Amino acid sequence: MKVMSRILGTGACLALLVGASAALALDAAGEGRRVYLRVNCYGCHGGHSGGGMGPNFRSERPEAGDLREVIREGAEGGMPAYPTLTATDITNLGAYFKTLRTAAEPTFTHWWEAVPTQ
C-alpha cells in the first residue's frame, strides 16, 4: 500500500508540473522569438533584431504582408527564402517584431527550452 501511495503521489506531482508548464507556455511574441532564434535570423539581423548585414527591425518593423512575402520568397541583397516556415511561424514573427522596444519584448536566448527564461 505504501508503494502504491508513493506511485500515485509521484503521478500527481508530475501532473501538477505538466499543468504548470502548460500554463507558462509562450505567447505569440515568445514563439516568434523562438522562430527568430531557431532559424538563425539573428545571424544577419542581430541577436535582438537591431540589424547587422540585414535590416534593423527595432527601428522599422516590417508590415505583415511584406514579412510573409520576403520570408516565403527571399529578397535581393542576400535574404534567403524560408518556404518551410508555417503561416503560424510567420504570424508569430510579426508578433515578436511588434514587441521590440517595449516591456513585452521577449529576450531569451535558449529557444530549445520548453519554457525559456528571460
Image (cartoon, grey):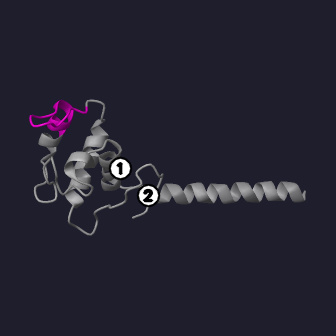
Q: Secondary structure at mark 1?
A: helix
| On-image quarter of the N terminus | bottom right
Mark 2, other Cα within 10 Å: few <14 / some 14–19 / many ≥20: some
At x 28%, y 65%, the residue is 104
Q: Position of residue 45 (x, y in %)?
A: 20, 50
Q: How far across and down, in percent of the image, does residue 39 sit? A: 32, 41
Magenta region includes residue 38: no
Q: Is residue 58 above or below residue 75?
A: below
**Residue at position x 32%, y 61% in the image:** 106
Q: Position of residue 112 (x, y in %)?
A: 44, 48
Is residue 98 toward the left or the right of residue 18 in the image? left
Badge 1 crowding class, 10 Å Cα cut-off, few under 14, some 14 to 19, many 20 or more, is many
Magenta stretch in the rendered image: 68-82
Residue type of the residue flagged with mark 2: Pro
- Circles 1 and 2: CB distance less than 8 Å? yes
Residue position marked by numbered label 2 in the rendering: 116
| Quarter assignment of residue 8 | bottom right
Q: Nearer the viewer, residue 12 or 79?
A: 79
According to the picture, the residue beneath numbered tag 1 turns out to be 34
Magenta segment's dominant SS is loop
